[in-house]
Image: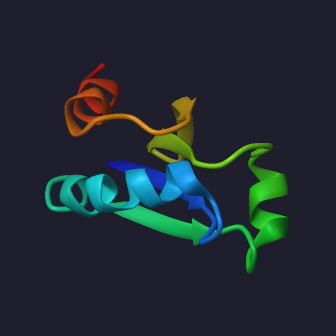
Amino acid sequence: MRKLFYYSAPWCGPCKMLGPIMDQVAQSTPVEKINIDYELDRARAANVSSVPTVILVENEQEVRRFVGAKSYQQVMDFING
């Protein structure tokens, strides 16, 4: 099963741009949003050093990740990669 982990923060400009896109993506792929202000330990455990970071996981294993804002089509291409 595929799932996206979306690490973001409310003060992050690129996160504000990517947030609505991730809401659209969540209609077809499960997305777990992680606010690093409240879950910094999870971000550190996933080696997240910049936000936004999106990690694609399949069968509980990281497949790939990207950092920064992307368009809806870029995110879908990333998922289907």
Q: Quadrant of residue 40?
A: bottom right
Is residue 73 positioned above or below 11 on the image? Answer: above
Number of marks drawn: 0
Is residue 33 positioned above or below 12 on the image? Answer: below
Horizontal side of 28 relative to 63 (left or right) equals: left
Q: Residue at x 59, y 72 (%)?
A: 10
Horizontal side of 41 relative to 43 (left or right) equals: right
Q: Residue at x 74, y 80 (%)?
A: 38
List the single residue furthest toward the left. Answer: 28
List the single residue furthest toward the bottom. Answer: 38
Quadrant of the image containing the C terminus? top left
Horizontal side of 25 relative to 60 (left or right) equals: left
Residue nearest the observer in this picture, 66 or 62: 66
User: What percent of the width, then of the height, locates residue 76?
Assistant: 23, 33
Q: Residue at x 58, y 48 (%)?
A: 52
Q: Quadrant of residue 78?
A: top left
Residue nearest the observer in this picture, 21 or 43: 21
Coloring scheme of the render?
A: rainbow
User: What percent of the width, then of the height, locates residue 51?
Assistant: 65, 49
User: What percent of the width, then of the height, locates residue 4?
Assistant: 42, 50
List the single residue furthest toward the top. Answer: 81
Q: Residue at x 48, y 43 (%)?
A: 57
Residue nearest the observer in this picture, 67 or 15: 15
List the single residue furthest toward the front. Answer: 13
Q: Quadrant of residue 70?
A: top left
Horizontal side of 3 relative to 54 (left or right) equals: left
